[in-house]
Amino acid sequence: MALVLTYGSSGSQGEPVARKLLEAGHTVKAVVRHVDRAAALQARGAEVVRGDLSDLESLKAASAGVDAVFLMMPFSAGGNPFALMGNALKAAKEGGAKLLVFNTGGHPPESPTGIPMLDFRLQLEDFIANSGIPTIILRPGVYMENFLGPWCLPSIKERNAVAYPHRAKMRVSWIASDDLGAFAVSALERPQLAGQRFTLGGPEALDGAAIAHAFSAALGREITYDGIAPEAFGATMAQIMGPEAGAGIGVAYGYSNAQPDDAMSVDMSGILEQLPVKQTRLEDWVRQHRAAFGAGA
């Protein structure tokens, strides 16, 4: 079993990684900015340590003696992302990490688009790939947890409508954050895969009608799909995350909406042979969160 340092451990993307590592019998050192927000992980057996990407010394202390590192860099982290990532990489190398698994937080484009929120992922991938640490890169698509966000949840509860800025005909391979956690554990346990980049999605490619059907079946009431304009979604996000982030998100979704219907559909068959994970269907995921959405009959 390995000693793994996990970043973002108090957030929706990083917490499942730390939790599933513990369930698999690994030792986890969870680095967070606010230790009190990781009390549940600590109770499960993780060593929770304070660290900040802008504080190299805190990362060196957290990284000492680790076998592997799970790393992610939120678009909203602020500051110079390459300087922040450089701190994490330097600390990992000095700490003796033999493997790095990096979560891009979303599908990067095939080539630069001129849209910072998308190109940022491509640039970070290359930056990390040249770090000198054996690296596996995970590229998850759109998280099912977005349906629980304040930009989406109220419309489901109050209007019985899934309002999201994807065209109704787009087929998207939604992925559960718990499944991403399982993929990360699978990658961390397979250092022989270093050098590879895995574009991940869920087990189904769902258009708007299929999303509505999954919600309706899980909640026991009729749910519709409302493909809202990316600009309107960006304006909503600006109220939550600030005007600059909101504008960037609106532009990024506008770009996605202009792509072919299957651009966000992922064939997972070959990937599951290398990273064996039992995936979660959207209907089953919604059932797991019935209380949040307001269960029907």
Image (cartoon, rainbow, N blue to C red):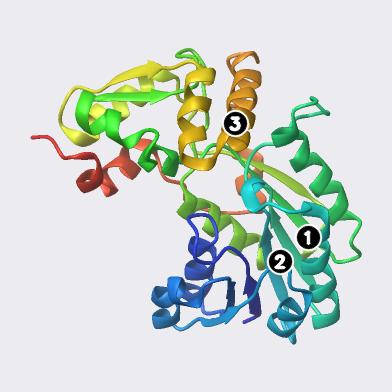
Quick one: label 2 or label 3, which is nearer the N terminus?
2
Please identify the residue farthest to the left as the structure is shown.
297
Quick one: label 3 or label 1, which is nearer the N terminus?
1
Q: Is residue 291 visible?
A: yes
The image's mark for residue 292 is none
Q: Residue at x 54, y 63 (%)?
A: 17
Q: Residue at x 50, y 81 (%)?
A: 46
Tell me which corner region of the image, top left, top right, bottom left or bottom right, holds residue 214. Answer: top left
Amino acid type, label 2: Leu
Residue indicated by mark 3: 249
Position above or below: 278 against 109 = below
Q: Residue at x 48, y 20 (%)?
A: 232
Q: CA distance from mark 2 to mark 1?
A: 7 Å
Tell me which corner region of the image, top left, top right, bottom left or bottom right, holds residue 59. Answer: bottom right
| Labels 3 & 1 near each other (Cβ < 8 A) | no
Picture coordinates of residue 252 (x, y %)? 64, 27
Q: Residues within 10 Å of mark 2 (few under 14, many from 20)?
A: many
Taking the image as shown, residue 29 lies to the left or right of residue 205, namely right
Q: Residues within 10 Å of mark 3 (few under 14, many from 20)?
A: many
Position above or below: 281 against 159 = below
Residue indicated by mark 1: 85
Amino acid type, label 3: Ile
Picture coordinates of residue 62 (x, y %)? 68, 81
The image's mark for residue 53 is 2
Q: CA distance from mark 3 to mark 1?
A: 22 Å
| Labels 2 & 1 near each other (Cβ < 8 A) | yes
